[in-house]
Structure formats: structure tokens, C-alpha cells
Amino acid sequence: MFNKLKLLLNRLIVALRIKKNQLPIFFFLLVLSSVFWVLIVLSKDYTTTVRYQATFVDLPKDKLLIDDKNVDLHLQVVAPGFTILANRLRYRKYIPLSVSSFIPKRKGNKWNYYWLGKQSISQLQDVLPTNMQLLNVQPNRIDVMLDEKAERVLPVQIKTDLSFKELFRQKEPIRLEPSTIVISGPKAVVEVFDYVSTETLILDNISSNSFGTIKIQPLNHSEINYSLTNINWELKVEEYTEGEIILPINVKNVPKGYDIKLFPNEVIINYLVSLDKFDLVKKDIFRTSVNFDYMKKRLPIELDFQADFIENVRLKPEKVEYFLIKK
């Protein structure tokens, strides 16, 4: 292609009998004339169609757009070539359409708002360049659906994947601040949900208190807005230890005129307790018993009482044999 242009230019130079020392002047005049020709062409008015994307603004405060669709406006305009060229070179072109000026029509629980292009020529003209005259617009009608806006306060539930260092454990439920957030959106959508979750908090080999922030996991609806996107969390950890205590076993419902002897007559209680409460463990915070039953050869040991701060209680043995003795 380049060789053909070069050949054509050489033939033109030969035909016009241009000398080599005149070539710079020739090229300057050629470029200058081309510039003038382009300026003359672009200064003329042309009729063409330009495309803009509609954006919906000025929604009623108590309503939300539920069908956020892309709408292209094809505008037939008369404008100078310069203006048309500049318009086509723009990457994105938007025209705001004020929904508050649309014509409302109720459809059940929702509202249909529609816009008529022929009645909005003057409004569209105001947002176009001053030297671009609008002749026609397509489509002539645009419909959008709005729903009642609603808000709801929902509790936040944190998802966790935690592992603790040996002899450490979670002391209490993870504290969230705030523990609730406000969601807003179409009423029919907002009423479906009872809570929101966070992303999964992953911590390994935990041995001390921790805190931080975590993101709210969006609900599966793009129409919902959130008062917060992150919340604070605090995890309290305690060190615990295992203890052992030996207690006598009480017997209930012994038949009149009889004594009973248990084998064994004591039970070993193994338990877990936080290290800071280990000194509070006494024999009187436990109570065990067996309920005499003729039908059973071995009586199961029952834990009648234990303190609230004691956990994971295990009895050894779990059952005892007995010997009934007549007085």
C-alpha cells in the first residue's frame, strides 16, 4: 500500500514538473489545502442520528426503581460537522431523564412511570450542545417500574471457622458492634429476610483475645441497600484446665426395712473449668445419686447438680452394682 502511494506521488510530481528543491513548498501547500478543505467540510451542517444512554434520576423519595434496564436513545439532530465528530469521539454519552416528570400509573402494588419522547423534545434539547438541534427521538415511549421503598432492622450473624490452641477456648459469644444493620429496598424484597450474615471469620491456633472488622455478605438481591458494609467483632478467649473430684453417691427410694450397699460407693467426676475459676471448685458444687429400681441389676448414676461454670462433666463409673440388706 505504501509503495503504491509512493508511486502515485512520484507520478504526480513528474506530471506537475515539480523540481526537487520545490518539494517542501509543494507538500506544505498540499497539507494546508487539505486542512482548509477539512475545515470547510466540517463547518457545514449535517443531519444524522446520535446515540445516548438514558439514566434515570430524581426518583420519588418513597420509591425505588425495580427494573434498572439499559435504554438507548436515538436522536435525529442537525449540527455542524465539528459537533458531530466531537460527539462520536466521546466514549460514553448519557442523557439524564427525570423520573419525577414521568407520567405515573398504578399497577397493583407497584407504579408504572412512562416518558413520552415527543413531549420531551425541549427538555432533551437543553442537555445537548447549543449548536445541535434535535429533530426527533426514538423510542418515543419509555416505561419504568417503581416499588414502595421500605426499611428494616435486621440482626447480624457472624460466620466463623475457628480453631484454638490446646487448653484454650472461646469464653463467650463473639460480640458484634453494631449487632444490627438497616437494609432498604423494595418492600416485597425487604420483608423476605430475617437476618444478614458476615463473610466467614477464619482464625487458627487462637490463644488470646482478638478483634477486627469484617464485611457484611450481601443478600442475593441487587436492589437492597445497606446502612453499613463492615462491622466490628471481638472474640474473648480463656484458658481452661481439667479437674477431678471424688464424691459419695446418694441413694433414692430405698425400700423400708432395708439398707443398700453400692459397689463402688463413690464416683469420680472429671470436668473442665476455666483457669481463673479453678479455685472455686469444691465438693458441694456437685451432687450425684442413684434411683433404686428392683428391675435393674446396675443403677445408673445421675448428676443432680453442678455449678454453672463447670463444663463437660464425665462420671466414672456411669453405673454401680448394689446389694440390698434387710435390717
Image: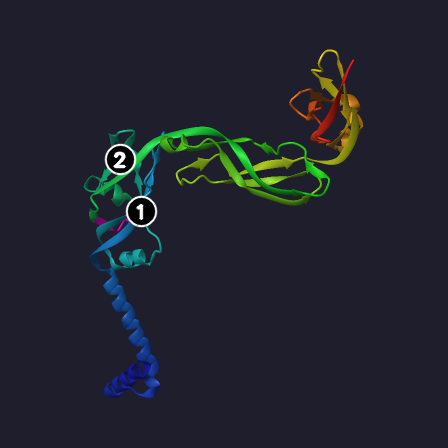
User: Label 2 neighbourhood size at 10 Å, few (<14), some (14-19), many (20+)?
Assistant: some
Residue 276: assigned label: none
Category of crowding for the residue at label 1, using alpha-carbon neighbours closer than 10 angstroms: few (below 14), some (14–19), many (at least 20): few
Instruction: Name which of mark 2 and mark 1 comes first in the sequence.
Output: 1
Image quadrant holding the C terminus, namely top right
Determine if the magenta segment contains residue 182.
Answer: no
Is residue 23 placed above or below 165 in the rendered structure?
below
Q: Quadrant of the N terminus?
A: bottom left
Side (left or right) of 156 relative to 212: left
Of residues 205 and 187, the one drawn nearer to the viewer in this rendering = 205
Q: Is 244 placed above or below 30 here?
A: above
Query: Residue 178 appears at what percent x and percent y?
Result: 56, 31
The overriding secondary structure of the stretch rendered in magenta is: loop
Q: Nearer the viewer, residue 35 or 155?
A: 155
* Residue 219 in picture, x, y percent from top left: 45, 39
- State whether residue 61 appears in this view: no
Task: Calculate the distance from the C-alpha at mark 2 to the C-alpha at mark 1.
Answer: 16 Å
Look at the image and give the residue range highlighted in magenta: 129-134
Q: Does dot 1 land on a helix, a strand or a loop?
A: loop
Residue 271, image quadrant: top right
Residue shown at 26% from the left, 51% from the top: 131
Give the amino acid at mark 1.
Asn
Q: Nearer the viewer, residue 6 or 180?
A: 180
Secondary structure state at the residue bearing disc 2: strand
Question: Which of the labelled discs sits on residue 70, or is there none?
Answer: 1
Residue 212 placed where, x, y %?
62, 40
Residue that badge 2 annotates: 113
